[in-house]
Amino acid sequence: VGFLSHENGRYSFAYLRRELQQPEFRPLPGLTRAVAAPIEADTLFPLFAERVISSRRPDREVSLTALGLPLDAAPMEVLARSHGHRVGDTIELLPAPEASAGQTVQFTFLTHGVRYLAPSEQDKIAMLQHGDPLRLVEDSQNPANPRALLVTASDGIRLGWVPDPLIDIINAIENPDLRVERANKPDVGYHFRLLVRLAGVVRESKGLFSGPDWETN
């Protein structure tokens, strides 16, 4: 629905124009002022700050280790790696790498839907090592999204799905190289099981997050 950024010590949030034009559009809690124009602040907006793994949480070290982050990771680093996930809502934060046509780009993401995999497929995740090659497979029979992309091991075993908002971004990358950034055991929970790193060159005909669909207010 919008872009959250941090530059020169200031946080900024802007809605996508395409979302503002939807009849059912509802602004995010605490970000109603951003509807008219981008909103800036010296501190991270509460809606997002509460999604950063708190230093008071006893599982902070375990969670950050599972994400491949140091204990002093900045809030935006934590949000980009963890997706800002909270049980019971649908808000998710994903990396938005800037790159023009012909440029190299890389970013990480957590696979979705691990809880829906078979036990043997979930066990496969725990066996993976950093740098292991992975594959992207179209999942056209997926009842939730016929454009879904599966992440699989090199032997074809399913490991989860690409987050839907990243599908168009990945399709704009030529010959994406997908590798294991970090694979975790079941004790970290389904959402943090598999962290993937994707790298590739942006297609000559496209730039990432460019064009009318990505214009903000």
Image (spheres, helix red, strand yellow):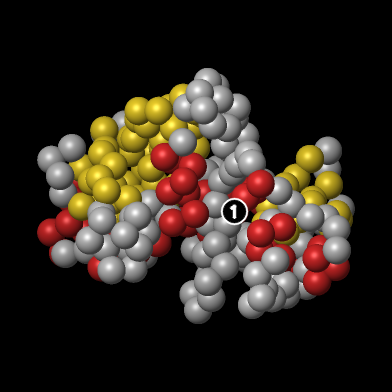
Q: Depth check: give the residue in front, 196 or 177.
A: 177
Percent from the top left, x then y, of residue 176?
A: 37, 31
Secondary element at tag 1? helix
Quadrant of the rendering where the N terminus is positioned: bottom right
Q: Amino acid at mark 1?
A: Leu
- Residue occupying the point 44% across, 32% down: 173
Left or right: 12, with 142 as reference point = right
Q: Depth check: give the residue in front, 198 or 76.
A: 198
Residue 155 against residue 147 in the figure, above or below: above
Residue 73 visible somewhere in the drawing: no
Label 1 sits on residue: 79
- Residue occupying the point 62% across, 64% down: 51
Q: Depth check: give the residue in front, 116 or 174.
A: 174
Percent from the top left, x then y, of residue 42?
A: 86, 53
Q: Among all residues in the image, which is located at the extreme top?
A: 102
Residue 186 against residue 89 in the figure, above or below: above
